Amino acid sequence: MRKYWTKEMLEYIKSNYANESSQSIADRFDIKLNAVYNKAFVLGLKKSTEYIEKHCRNLERSVRNEFAKGHKPWNKGQKGLQIGGVQTQFKKGRLPHNTKPIGYRSMRDGYWVERTEKGFEFVHVLIWKQHYGDIPKGLFIVFKDRNQQNLVIENLELIDRAENMRRNSVQNLPKEILEVIHIKKSITRKINQIEKNGTK
């Protein structure tokens, strides 16, 4: 459940963020760690030098372990070097055990896709190509009844992006739905304002 920053929470994070762990603050108020990071960013809060020196020594170690500029790898110039494991390597032309056969179909984001020699392609696109050939650049296939499972040629239509935008424009919705959308946007703006200011 979404939580809002109260005045007490804001005062606490302003006073303690510099020297207390962000996770500790998140646990105190039973909120997500990202919420603490985001609020600290909005308020311009940062960890103190003392806190960083005490708790972030791993950063120094990681820098010391980086490759120095100009470092030469030990295997430079040894292309194709084999050091064990040859027996378990894939042989040229061998396919993984989970490779799907040509014609295999599966669902992806609500659309049927089929494996072809070129890889996976949308089934409705394949059906269109079988009847009318390649799809001209800038055009794409849509479902007349908006049912992505209705894979018959009579239900497919070729349109351009302008027509697709016209059909899907929010202005085409009934007046009642438009009013609900506007109310929802107003509520969202109010919630964001409350969350930013930390007031109810």
Image (cartoon, helix red, strand yellow):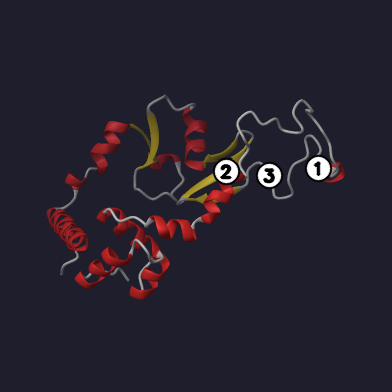
Observer-nearest residue: 139 or 90? 90
The numbered mark, 3 or 2, whose residue comes first in the sequence reads 3
What's the residue at 68%, 44% (across, down)?
101
Residue ID for mark 2: 114
Q: Is the residue 24 above or below the residue 99 in the image? A: below
Which residue is at a point 39% across and 73% down the rendered structure image? 27
Q: Are marks 2 and 1 in contact (CB under 8 Å)?
A: no
At mark 1, the secondary structure is loop
Q: CA distance from mark 3 to mark 2?
A: 10 Å
- Tell me the number on the disc at residue 174: none
User: Can you see residue 4?
Assistant: no
Mark 3 and mark 1 lie on one chain; the one further toward the N terminus is 1
- Please report whichever mark, 2 or 1, sits nearer to the chain's N-terminal start: 1
Q: Is residue 22 above or below residue 95?
A: below
Mark 2 and mark 1: Cα distance apart in space:
29 Å
Q: Residue at x 12, y 53 (%)?
A: 175
Q: Secondary structure at mark 2?
A: strand
The residue depicted at 62 percent of the width and 47 percent of the height is: 104
Q: Quadrant of the C terminus?
A: bottom left
Q: Which one is in front in this view, the residue at disc 3 or the one at disc 1? A: 1
* 12 sits left or right of 133 in the view: left
Q: Amino acid at mark 3?
A: Pro
Residue 199 in view:
yes
Say which amino acid is labelled 2: Glu
- In the image, which is nearer the foreground, mark 2 or mark 1? 1
Residue 125 lies, in percent from the top left, at 48, 37
The amino acid pointed to by label 1 is: Gln
Position of the N terminus, as image quadrant, is bottom left
Q: Nearer the viewer, residue 180 or 142?
A: 180
Pick the front one: 96 or 88: 88
Q: Which mark is residue 101?
A: 3
Which residue was labeled with disc 1?
Answer: 89
